[in-house]
Amino acid sequence: MQCIANIGSKEMAEAFGHDIPKLLVSGDTMDVVKQSAALCNQLGQFLSNRETNLRYLALESMCSLANSELSHEAVKKHQEVVILSMKMEKDVSVRQQAVDLLYAMCDKSNAEDIVQEMLNYLETADYSIREEMVLKVAILAEKYATDFTWYVDVILNLIRIAGDYVSEEVWYRVIQIVINRDEVQGYAAKTVFEALQAPACHENMVKVGGYILGEFGNLIAGDSRSAPLVQFQLLHSKYHLCSPMTRALLLSTYVKFVNLFPEVKSTVQDVFMQHSNLRSADAELQQRASEYLKLSQIVSTDVLATVLEEMPAFPERESSILAVLKKKKPGRVPENEIRESKSPANLSQSPAPGTTQPPVPATAAADLLGLATPPSNNTGVLVDVLGDLYGNPVSTSPQPAASQSYNPKKFICKNNGVLFENELIQIGVKCEFRQNLGRLGLFYGNKTQFPLSTFSVVLRNPVSTSPQPAASQSYNPKKFICKNNGVLFENELIQIGVKCEFRQNLGRLGLFYGNKTQFPLSTFSVVLANPVEWLNTLNLQIKPIEPILDAGAQIQQLVNAECIEDYKDSPSLIISFIYNGVAQKITMKLPLTLNKFFEPTEMNADSFFARWKNLGATNNPQKCQKIFKAAVPMDFSAVRTKLIGFGMALMDNIDPNPENFVCAGIIHTRSQQIGCLLRLEPNKQAQMYRLTVRSSKEDVSTEICELLANQF
């Protein structure tokens, strides 16, 4: 190193700049750091040399040093000089080398500065290096992003400044990252919506905007400036300026809007109708518009929500942008892979049917997001989902068989004939009626070669399994899903109240029976309906009570409950007694739904969304989602009250959209604890809710979602 100050000739300087750095980087001496600092200082001086080749070699040598941990910090001290070289050098190859050096010296401490400088230079950069600069900026923004809102801003700026050089890999990647990070989805939707308002908007921006608004436009729909109709009109104003592939993506966005925003359904259907005929010269657009039009017209809200559900998270994988850069400059890109941090592992790469899909690249390797469109003749999924709409409803009466014949409606206007027939039995009927009396003759014919044993005929539901209707009857078990005390059942004979308390997997219910009549209720008994059904899930102990309930009196009965395993619905009690010589029977559900065993759990936003993503894997389904119309006008204070009463912790300032409700809790059973997360997204304009529940057990997610969806 003593020769540094004595280098004079061009040949010695070139040898110094080209070979010494390689020796230092591969050396094992203790003073490598000091030598690297001295060498970097000398190389920095070469950057002002009049010889173009020497400046180039200096940058190349510093690039080698920057890739070594021992000399990286020393190289960073020359950041400002290198930026000047990138902007001011006359020779494009030297400017290119300066860009390579900035890429190599970038780390968490200087990433934002370097990315911003490269973005500023990109507007005036040579066309020959723009594509590579775009790739490098995208990689650095992803690799060193501490706040992914910054990453979204960088990529959208890339598209704005150099949209022609933003490859499909780049905009696919930003969509993948936004989908995998709930905390940035609202910001991404808002930012891309604002970017689309520019008079001149690049087609890649339309692609990103169409995809993100189709998935997350509901997160900004509460603002009148970005209302559903405004979003649709903004996207559709770009439609006629785009290529057929982008138009196809926008049509998929529009059908997503039908699901998210019912108020724009008629407007979207008009667009589908226009493009489902010869007005569109592209066969793919015609077919897509026709299918989406029929889908929006004939299916129910629930089926539509299933077909067009939100895209699942994508699996962790190496950045495809880095792979493209390595291919462009083999041997000159550091082998430091970029992988998504905290991404859910083992996720399915296949999107849900009907999800918005970006254009399919020419090769399978370029299909970064698993968005390849299936062949147009692959309609199996749609047919299965909509099968009940084409004359194949699932019957709850006699089970289907190959030769079954059963149509009770034909006997509305006739009295005689074959009532039911399959390969085992034929049942005929002959009827006669006179005034309020009737007589039916049923004829059972065995069509087999074997006897039909234990043959019996009984009347289905001779006594109603729910409380007997009465003029003053009051019975609504659903209202006790979100509260523990109140009148559970009441008619003109009896009033039944309840008070409940729960702790972890244990519960105690006090039932209060009040006789409202002037006569005693005799042989009063309370038993559990279908006790065998609950043996493995609930341990119920019902305390005995007196057999006579005197006139005007009230008695109390205690019920102790222990949750053994998760379960569906809730157990029922059969209350029977004799009133004035007439037997009475009431079947009543206990307020013992699964949510009663919740323990509220507080967590911060980072913990919540990390757990939320882990529970959202499509190949390990642990979530349930329902989109439904509000049964009553939306009242957010009432919604808060119900969510708190449901048993979970209602947490504020967690969701990016302040109007959304976020809850967390743990269901305690004897055998396990089941973590559960909940997200309720109201849309006031459409008077619709989207409820998503994720838990560590699929059946629990489904049950919690079903219970809560009936409350709003």
Image: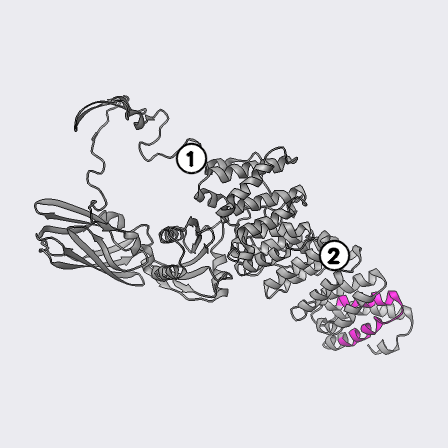
Q: Residues within 10 Å of mark 2 (few under 14, many from 20)?
A: many
Q: Element under label 1?
A: helix
- 38 left or right, relative to 243: right
Q: Is residue 471 left or right of residue 248?
A: left
Front-lying residue, 615 or 484: 484
Residue 335 in view here: no
Q: Which residue is mark 2?
A: 132
Residue 133 horizontal/vertical position (percent): 73, 59
Q: Residue at x 27, y 58 (%)?
A: 562
Quarter assignment of residue 74: bottom right
> What residue is at 39 percent from the left and 34 percent from the top?
393
Marks 2 and 1 sit apart, C-alpha to C-alpha, by 53 Å
> In the image, 289: left or right of 297?
right
Amino acid type, residue under disc 1 in the picture: Asp
Residue 131 shows in this picture: yes
Q: Main secondary structure of the magenta part?
A: helix
Of residue 169 and residue 264, the one placed in the foreground of this image is 264
Looking at the image, which is closer to me, 263 or 569?
Answer: 263
What residue sits right under mark 1 in the picture?
Answer: 388
The region drawn magenta spans 37-64
Q: Is residue 635 highlighted in magenta?
A: no
Q: What x and y, as percent, mark residue 550?
A: 8, 56
Mark 2 lies on a secondary structure that is helix
* Marks 2,1: beta carbons within 8 A: no
